[in-house]
Amino acid sequence: MEYKYWKNLMADLNGTWLGTYWQQGVPSRFEAVFVQSGNALSGSILDDNYLGEAQIRGEVNGRSISFTKRYLITSPAPIQYIGTLSENEDYIQGQWNIGRRFFGPWEARRSGDNLMAELNTRIQKQIPQATG
């Protein structure tokens, strides 16, 4: 019984997220695909600029998330991200940093594709199945 209660408290970040991070006030858009297994977080991020694709590894604790982002080709410096997931689990906001010199805010929202899939699943569960 306690396990079910604990499991319900764990946030679910699985899926596609669209976000923005700011460096020196300049916004950069990105698309992230998060894969969560327990409190382990992995996935990929594709930036909408010259930096390209990155892999992420991190963890989820309640509604707090932290991960390290490493670009595949362009930048050898790892980027640390921390953030907090909203109660309805569709919005994250937080801070990123590269050491002490570079830092800024970031935010992300669940992609509409995932929201439509979730809505369709809920509708299917509510529709009585025909019996014959």
Image: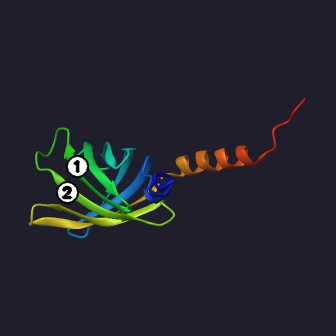
> Which disc number belongs to residue 80?
2
- The colour scheme applied to this rendered structure is rainbow
Q: Residue at x 16, y 43 (%)?
A: 74
Q: Do labels 2 and 1 touch, CB within 8 Å?
A: yes
Any part of residue 106 in sight: no
Q: CA distance from mark 2 to mark 1?
A: 6 Å
Q: Earlier in the sequence, mark 2 or mark 1?
A: 1
Horizontal side, residue 21 vs residue 118: left or right: left
Number of dots carrying numbers: 2
Q: Position of residue 19 (x, y in %)?
A: 38, 57
Quadrant the C terminus occupies = top right
Q: Amino acid at mark 2?
A: Gln
Check residue 69 in the rendering and tell me which mark sits there, or answer none: 1
Residue 35 place in picture, x, y as percent: 38, 43
* Extreme residue toward the front, this view: 1
Q: What secondary structure is marked by label 2?
A: strand
Q: Residue at x 49, y 57 (%)?
A: 5
- SS at circle 1: strand
Residue at 71% from the left image edge and 48% from the top image edge: 123
State the residue lying farthest toward the bottom: 25
